[in-house]
Amino acid sequence: MRKNGMFGSQGSGDTSGFGGLAKTQTTIGSTERPFGGYFDQVADDLERAYPLFNDAIEKVVVDRGELTLFIKSNRLLDVAKILRDQLRFEMCVGVNGVHYPEETNRELHAIYSLLSITRNQRIRLEVCVSEKDPHVPSLVEIWAGTNWHERETYDMFGIIFDNHPGLTRILMPDDWSGFPQRKDYPLGGIEIEYKGATVPAPSERRSYS
Amino acid sequence: MTTYTDPYASSQETTEGRVYSVTGGDWDALITEIGATKEERVVLNMGPQHPSTHGVLRLILELEGETVTETRCGIGYLHTGIEKNTEFRNWTQGVTFVTRMDYLSPIFNETAYCLGVEKLLGITNDVPERATVIRVMMMEFNRISSHMVALGTGALELGALSPMIFAFREREKVLDIFEMLSGLRMNMAYIRPGGVAQDLPEGALKKIRETVKDLRHNFKDNEKLLIGNSIWIKRTQGVGYLDLAGCTTLGITGPVLRSTGLAWDLRKAQPYCGYEDYEFDIPTTDTCDVYGRFLIRMKELEQSLRIIEQCVSKLEKLEGQPVMVADKKIAWPSQLSVGADGMGNSLNHIREIMGESMEALIHHFKLVTEGFRVPAGQVYTAIESPRGELGVNLVSDGGTRPYRVHFRDPSFNNLQSTAAMCEGGQISDVVAAVASIDPVMGGVDR
């Protein structure tokens, strides 16, 4: 990805000279061993406990002192079960979605933050699915607390968590259409009507870079 | 007896059975009517506008007489789309948004967010010590004000009115401190990426010392009212039971988790902001009930005061040190200060930017309007808010605006335990159990 300018603005009549700067940004790739810290231990333990480890893990990313395991969605349930039962990750503190429209067939990411109280460690799981087939197995049977987090991720991103006990919208009204946190969904996505007057969506009023 | 008809109270027949709307003045009529039916099972809709559901929380209770057989929460009534909004503003402006999520602990929202931005920028170790100590002090004051609301409204909902008066009296003192330090009582946007918005005003430490003394003395009022109070104990002991296994599977943190006897507090377990340098204890109880959580909150007040006192003595030694990172690509290059008349910028500042350093003005303008760039990546930072683990998941694509901001709010997660705490209990215990979770709907719905 190529970024122009120091601050990221374009076509603003920039006179500071900073607009002329250009630099290339690289996306974060896979990390090779050693991962550093307790991450090697976690990876070793997981490899030992789960023979299909190399098949299940798409890539491992260590960035800014955090470990992210990219898991294939069909292996997620197995990996989660082993992480809970054998590696003592007792808590899944939350599920979060991110939409990357430019990553073809991997547009939607579901991100799970795991916490082990016993080991006092944190890791993150990431599952990538396509917009066309956004199915991820639900982890409610492993960690009951993911129930609402998965509903929120469904509500905001449209990721369908299979076998979830009641996958309905949680923050938006039940009859809402569209998934508000996707990048193609504008801010203020519905027209605001006030006594017959209409207001353009905030994203169309003014450009900020 | 005079009878009157309430225009909003009525009943109607639906496919699911008869539905009654109750407004409060029509109990006699309702009891007569319900008493005439043979149906034992009643589905009660409580809220979202109800004085004892802690904000716009909707509880759907299935009752057999007075016993609750099923509980469901309806949330989303306060959804404001803050996470989406932050994607359309620069990283610094994000602070102004996130402070409004959990409106009873704004400083925690800001700090968690700023720690995340700093981690993305790689400047975690460059934040000046004075700024970090101020952050810790503000957080602990905020913990007190938040616990005061939890205790005050919690007691109020169970029918004890006086504790609320005392709790809000003390909270007011804390809000005065916030006003003195940041200019605002709530939603301060005081913590900024790289440090804090401004240094302490003159005489702040003296005022803080006096307030700490007052608070320590006045907390005794509520302790005398509630600890050991037999009515309070009857309403709270053994109510809202949730053990450790339930907490871990539901991801519950904060006072609810500590009421199971596990001393899990991120300030000790995974220290941030230099919490490892402070002396304080983690109060726990092993009763797993509402009374235990109440006791924990009471004891945490004293621990917060202890931390604040240590902050004050640290701040005395750090007098005159910066409160913002030195990097002028992140911190505003010009030194803003309010003019002598209390309005606008100080004359010195205007003289400097207009006369001496036009470059600084240009730079400042770019930084304020467009913001700084944050290297691409993803981070998760978690801090111990008054309600438990407040986590922030930030994604940057390398631009001047966040690519994704997600808050893992403890209220949102902990509210899931309502069913586990309430089912099988009495309907009046639902109120006590929900109050002990201390959910703040601004944080739940974001």
Image (spheres, coloured by chain):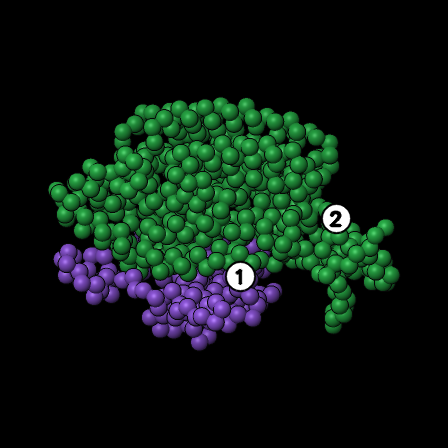
Chain colours: A purple, B green
- Indicate the amino acid at tag 1: Leu
B25 vs A166, nearest the viewer: B25
Tell me residue B36's x, y (percent).
87, 61
Q: Position of residue B183 (x, y in %)?
A: 39, 39
Reply above or below: A35 against A73. above
Task: Say if labels 1 and 2 share a chain.
Answer: no
> Residue at point 49% right, 23% down?
B213
Viewer-proximal residue, A166 or B230? Answer: B230
Q: Look at the image and tell me whether residue A148 can be seen.
A: no
Screen quadrant of the N terminus of chain A: bottom left
Would you identify the image quadrant in which residue B436 lies? top right
**Tag nearer the camera, 1 or 2:** 1
Chain containing the residue with disc 1:
A
Locate residue B385 relative to residue B426 in the image: left or right. Answer: left
Amino acid type, callout 2:
Gln
Disc 2 packing (10 Å; few <14; some 14–19; many ≥20): some
- Compared to residue A97, the image places residue B217 above or below, namely above
| Identity of the residue drawn at 51% across and 34% down | B172
The residue labelled by disc 2 is B426
Residue annotated with mark 1: A171
Q: Are circles 1 and 2 on residues that touch, CB within 8 Å?
A: no
Residue B132, horizontal then vertical, whole percent: 35, 36
Residue B322 seen in this snapshot = yes
